[in-house]
Image (spheres, grey):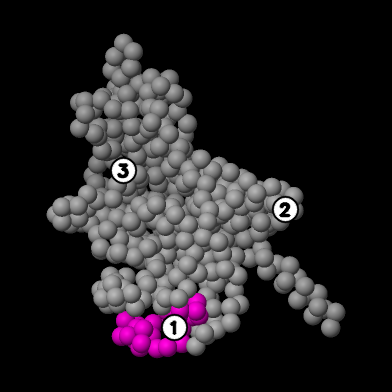
C-alpha cells in the first residue's frame, strides 16, 4: 500500500486518478490509524464481513472512467500507461447503487414477507454495516436465520462470527461502563461462538485466506505467517512526533494480536513451581471473580497448538487490590500435552484499586497422536477487596479448561 | 437432457445462497458496491467515482 501511495501521490493530487481503499479487517479504527501513520489521503471503506467476496489481500484493480476493469494485476510501473490511455465509452451493464444508508426497517419487512437464506444474510450484512452497535444482536439473529435455511454457507458462518466478535466487544464496553454497579455479564460466550463459526466457515472453504486470517488474529503463534498489529506502537509514536494526535482505538490489540509468529513451540519458566502446591490458600467460595476461557482455534489437531484466552472479571461489589501481588495463575496439562508456561501473571494498573476485566493468554500443544479432549487444570491467586466495608482478601479459585481435539 | 436441466436448475437455485467470489474481469464493468468509510461511516459506492480513473485497492493494515 505505501508503495502505491507514494507512486500515485502526484497523480492523485493532480486529479489524474482516484485511490479508493477497501479494508478487510474487524476493527476500522486500526486501519484508520494505519492510514494516518502512512499519511494516506484517500478514502478507505470498511468491509469487515467480506461482503465483496475477496479470498485474499492485497488486491489492486485499475478501473477506467466508465467503471470498466482495465487491469487486475497492475504494477506500479504500468500505472502511468493506464492514466495516459483514452478508453472508449462503454454501455452500462451493471446496476448502480444509491450512495445512501439502506432502509433497514423496509429490508426487514421484505425479508419477513418472503424469507430466504440470501435475504436474511443481506439483512445481517446491513445491520453490521449500517446499524451501529445497537443492531449487532439483530445481525446475529439474521445470520442465524440464514444458516437455519442454509447451514452450509461458509460466508454466512464467517459473517456470523464477525457479528459475534463485535457483540463480545460491545458487551465488554458496556461492562466497563457500568462496572461496580451492575450484574456482570460474561462476554466470552460471544467470543467462543465467533471462533466456532469462523472455524465452521474454514471447514466449508479451507482455502479461504480471509477466513483463516481472522482465526489467526486470535490464534497461536505457530499458525501465523506474519504478525497482525505489531506496528501500532511505532505508528503512535511517529504520529505524535509529527505533532498529531493518533486516532484513538476503542479496542487496543493485545495478546495474540500483537504476538510475533513462531516456527517452534517454545516453553518458558519450566522450573517454575506451583505457588500453592498443598492447596492451603482459602478458596473464593462466593466466586468474587468470574473466570471464563476461550480456546482458538475451536479444536486442536494432533501435534497442533491452540491459544487459550482466560478472563477474570470482578463481580459488581468487589475490586482488585493493586498494591499487593498481581493476579497469578498456575496451570497443569495432562500427560503428553505441553504448556507454553505454567505460571502466568496478569498485568496490573498503576492505580491502588481497580475493577477491570483481566486477561491472560497462553499456548498449548497436543501430543502427536491424540483423540480425546484434554482438561487443563489451573488455579488463580488474587487479592480482592469488598467495595462496602473495604475488607481485602487473598483468595484462590480453581478452574478447568477443556481443549477439544480434531 | 432432463438430468442436465435438473442440474442447471439446482445450480441456479443455489447461486443466490453462495456468497459471490470476487472475480473482476478485464474489459467488463466492475460490480458496484456500497460500504461505509472507516473514518465517519458515510456510505460510499464505487459508482460515485464514475468519470474518473480509479485504483481500487483491497487491503488490510495487518
Q: Which residue, given by chain and number where applicable, does mark 3 sit on? A: A342
Label 3 secondary element: loop
Membership of A80 in magenta stretch: yes
Q: Is residue A88 above or below residue A171?
A: below
On screen, residue A35 versus residue A158, left or right, reads left
Taking the spot 43% from the left edge, 42% from the top edge, the residue there is A169
Q: Residues within 10 Å of mark 2 (few under 14, many from 20)?
A: some
Label 1 secondary element: strand
Q: Which residue, given by chain and number where applicable, does mark 2 sit on? A: A115
Q: Which residue, given by chain and number where applicable, does mark 1 sit on? A: A71
Which image quadrant for residue A181? top left
Taking the spot 52% from the left edge, 75% from the top edge, the residue there is B30
Residue A211 visible from this viewpoint: no
The subunit carrying tag 2 is: A
Q: Which residues are magenta?
A: A62-87
Q: Residues within 10 Å of mark 3 (few under 14, many from 20)?
A: many
Gap in angstroms between the C-alphas marked 1 and 3:
53 Å
Amino acid at each position: 500500500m505505501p508503495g502505491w501511495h507514494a507512486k500515485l501521490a502526484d497523480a492523485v493530487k493532480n486529479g489524474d486518478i482516484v485511490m479508493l481503499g477497501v479494508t478487510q479487517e474487524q476493527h476500522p479504527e486500526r486501519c484508520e490509524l494505519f492510514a494516518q501513520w502512512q499519511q494516506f489521503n484517500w478514502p478507505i471503506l470498511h468491509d469487515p464481513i467480506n461482503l465483496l467476496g475477496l479470498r485474499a489481500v492485497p488486491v489492486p484493480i485499475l478501473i477506467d472512467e466508465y467503471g470498466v476493469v482495465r487491469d487486475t494485476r497492475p504494477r506500479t510501473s504500468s500505472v502511468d500507461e493506464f492514466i495516459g490511455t483514452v478508453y472508449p465509452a462503454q454501455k452500462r451493464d451493471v446496476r448502480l447503487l444509491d450512495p445512501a444508508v439502506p432502509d433497514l426497517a423496509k429490508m426487514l419487512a421484505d425479508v419477513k414477507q418472503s424469507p430466504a437464506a440470501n435475504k436474511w444474510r443481506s439483512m445481517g450484512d446491513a445491520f453490521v454495516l449500517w446499524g451501529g452497535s445497537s443492531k449487532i444482536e439483530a445481525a446475529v439473529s439474521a445470520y442465524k436465520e440464514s444458516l437455519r435455511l442454509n447451514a452450509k454457507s461458509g460466508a454466512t458462518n464467517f459473517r456470523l462470527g464477525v457479528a459475534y466478535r463485535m457483540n463480545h466487544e460491545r458487551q465488554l464496553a458496556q461492562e466497563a461502563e457500568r462496572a461496580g454497579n451492575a450484574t456482570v455479564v460474561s462476554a466470552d460466550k460471544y467470543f467462543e461462538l465467533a471462533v466456532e463459526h469462523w472455524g465452521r466457515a474454514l471447514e466449508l472453504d479451507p482455502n479461504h485466506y480471509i477466513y483463516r486470517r481472522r482465526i489467526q488474529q486470535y490464534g497461536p503463534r505457530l499458525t501465523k505467517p506474519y504478525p497482525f498489529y505489531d506496528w501500532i506502537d511505532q505508528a503512535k509514536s511517529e504520529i505524535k512526533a509529527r505533532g498529531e494526535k493518533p486516532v484513538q482505538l476503542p479496542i487496543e490489540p493485545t495478546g495474540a494480536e500483537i504476538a510475533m509468529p513462531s516456527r517452534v513451540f517454545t516453553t518458558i519458566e519450566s522450573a517454575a513451581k506451583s505457588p500453592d502446591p498443598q492447596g492451603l490458600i482459602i478458596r473464593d467460595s462466593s466466586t468474587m471473580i468470574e473466570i471464563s476461557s476461550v480456546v482458538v482455534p475451536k479444536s486442536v489437531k494432533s501435534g497442533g497448538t491452540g491459544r487459550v484466552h482466560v478472563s477474570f472479571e470482578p463481580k459488581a461489589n468487589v475490586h482488585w487490590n493493586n498494591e499487593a501481588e498481581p493476579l497469578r495463575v498456575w496451570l497443569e496439562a495432562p500427560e503428553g500435552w505441553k504448556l507454553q508456561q505454567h505460571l502466568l501473571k496478569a498485568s496490573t494498573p498503576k492505580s491502588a484499586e481497580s475493577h477491570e476485566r483481566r486477561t491472560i493468554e497462553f499456548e498449548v500443544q497436543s501430543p502427536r497422536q491424540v483423540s480425546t479432549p484434554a482438561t487443563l487444570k489451573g488455579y488463580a491467586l488474587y487479592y480482592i477487596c469488598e467495595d462496602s466495608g473495604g475488607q481485602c482478601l487473598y483468595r484462590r479459585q480453581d478452574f478447568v479448561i477443556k481443549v477439544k481435539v480434531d | 437432457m432432463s438430468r442436465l436441466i435438473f442440474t442447471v436448475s439446482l445450480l441456479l437455485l443455489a447461486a443466490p445462497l453462495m456468497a459471490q467470489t470476487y472475480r473482476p474481469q478485464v474489459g467488463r464493468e466492475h460490480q458496484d458496491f456500497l460500504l461505509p468509510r472507516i473514518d465517519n461511516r458515510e456510505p460510499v459506492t464505487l459508482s460515485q467515482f464514475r468519470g474518473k480513473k480509479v485504483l481500487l485497492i483491497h487491503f488490510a493494515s495487518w
